[in-house]
């Protein structure tokens, strides 16, 4: 199944995929700042022992993973590996980034509750801002994905993904 | 021994370059690992979850080190900058060592149809390991004997259990 024949992309499709790639470039810069700030918070004596910290940075690592995975898929698509398999793959990576961004935001607020020190709270506020930037970029990426696949295909790929991670009806 | 800012910059650039070289490998490794989740023989393979977690940790480390260097270059005053660099670089070393044992468990479930994805992952992981080791060498050169002193301190944070 992994070696199904590759699909040829038209020039217009290649351009739209390049637009998607360019949007991830912005995302990568934001994610780098995000995880650097998170490392700072993990090390800071005012916050390092806060409840929720471990799950918080794990969630952020999956956001980074989601972007990296999308970019890896785009790289592979441009080196003649574009296939139905890869289509599912890239949608899955995008959904990773989206879903773990939600977890990261929820967990940040849990972590923030435990912090009183002014310096660590300043880092928390910067992480909040960075997560807002990240959300905006993921929305932009969704638009690029929609343009690349076409709305119907994008929706059906997304619903395939949801089905693949849901308990099926019993027979 | 004090290092002037030119030397600092030179080493930071070298660390960035080493991680930049590994970035494409890391991205393709993440893409392939996600693909394992839909391949029937691999999606529930023992080792896949911890392997995925280590791949994500490596991604976090790459991004964190580069993010810290970018913040530093933008003129931000980061009081813990050295601790952050040592912490993330040394944690990369640990995460990288965790890649292959779990990956080998996953690879046991591989079939001929997935052979090339397994082989490609193995190759990419080797490349990632080399780039991490290179970045750490420059990090150690940047900080000299201070590296070990800082490492001893950040080990308190490294020893916090994780998932």
Image (cartoon, coloured by chain):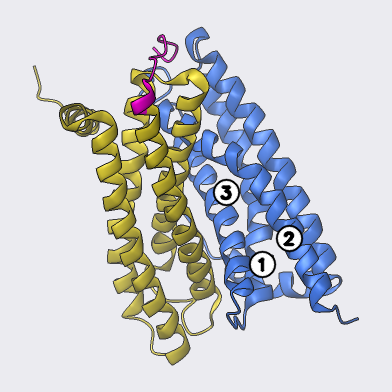
Chain colours: A yellow, B blue
- Residue at screen point 81% across, 56% down: B137
**Above or below, comparing residue B119 to residue A20 in the picture:** above
- What is the chain identity of the residue bearing mark 2? B
Residue topped by disc 2: B13
User: In this rendering, do the residues under marks 1 and 3 share a single chain?
Assistant: yes
- What is the chain identity of the residue bearing mark 3? B
Q: Residues within 10 Å of mark 2 (few under 14, many from 20)?
A: some
Q: Quadrant of the N terminus of chain A?
A: top left
Ranked by sequence position, the earlier of labels 1 and 2 is: 2
- Residue at screen point 59% across, 53% down: B62
**Above or below, comparing residue A118 to residue A101 in the picture:** below
Residue topped by disc 1: B85
Dot 2 falls on a residue whose secondary structure is helix
Ranked by sequence position, the earlier of labels 1 and 3 is: 3
Q: Quadrant of the C terminus of chain A?
A: top left
Q: Residues within 10 Å of mark 3 (few under 14, many from 20)?
A: many
Dot 1 falls on a residue whose secondary structure is helix
Q: Quadrant of residue A6?
A: top left
Relative placement, left or right, of B51 versus B38 is right
Residue topped by disc 3: B58
- What is the chain identity of the residue bearing mark 1? B
Query: What is the CA distance from the residue labelled 3 to the residue labelled 2?
Result: 20 Å
What segment carries the magenta color?
Answer: A1-13
Query: What is the CA distance from the residue labelled 1 to the residue labelled 3?
Result: 14 Å
Q: Mark 1 against mark 2, which lies toward the viewer?
A: 2
Q: Is residue A12 magenta?
A: yes
- Residue at screen point 62% across, 61% down: B88
Dot 3 falls on a residue whose secondary structure is helix
Viewer-closest of B36 and A159: A159
Ranked by sequence position, the earlier of labels 3 and 2 is: 2
**Residue A49 in sight from this viewpoint:** yes
**Residue B33 in sight from this viewpoint:** no
């Amino acid at each position: 199944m992994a070696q199904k024949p590759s699909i040829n992309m038209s020039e217009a499709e290649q351009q739209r995929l390049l637009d998607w790639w360019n949007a991830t470039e912005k995302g990568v810069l934001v994610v780098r700042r995000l995880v650097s700030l998170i490392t700072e918070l993990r090390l800071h004596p005012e916050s390092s022992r806060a409840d929720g910290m471990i799950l918080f940075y794990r969630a952020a690592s999956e956001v980074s993973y989601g972007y990296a995975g999308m970019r890896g898929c785009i790289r592979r698509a441009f080196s003649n590996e574009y296939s139905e398999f890869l289509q599912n793959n890239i949608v899955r990576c995008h959904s990773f980034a989206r879903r773990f961004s939600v977890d990261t935001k929820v967990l940040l607020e849990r972590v923030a509750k435990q912090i009183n020190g002014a310096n660590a709270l300043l880092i928390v506020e910067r992480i909040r801002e960075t997560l807002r930037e990240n959300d905006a970029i993921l929305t932009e990426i969704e638009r690029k994905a929609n343009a690349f696949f076409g709305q119907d295909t994008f929706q059906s790929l997304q619903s395939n993904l949801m089905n693949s991670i849901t308990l099926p009806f019993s027979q | 021994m004090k290092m002037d800012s030119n030397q600092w910059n030179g080493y930071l650039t070298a660390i960035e370059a080493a991680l930049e070289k590994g970035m494409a490998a890391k991205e393709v490794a993440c893409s392939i690992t996600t693909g394992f989740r839909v391949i029937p023989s691999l999606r529930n393979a023992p080792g896949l979850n911890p392997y995925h977690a280590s791949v994500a940790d490596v991604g976090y480390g790459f991004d964190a080190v580069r993010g810290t260097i970018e913040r530093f270059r933008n003129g931000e005053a980061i009081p813990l900058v050295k601790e952050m660099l040592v912490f993330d670089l040394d944690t990369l070393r640990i995460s990288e060592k965790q890649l292959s044992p779990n990956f080998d468990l996953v690879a046991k479930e591989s079939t001929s149809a997935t052979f090339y994805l397994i082989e490609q992952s193995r190759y990419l992981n080797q490349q990632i390991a080399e780039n991490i080791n290179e970045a750490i060498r420059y990090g150690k050169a940047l900080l000299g004997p201070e590296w070990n002193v800082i490492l001893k301190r950040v080990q308190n944070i490294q020893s916090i259990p994780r998932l």
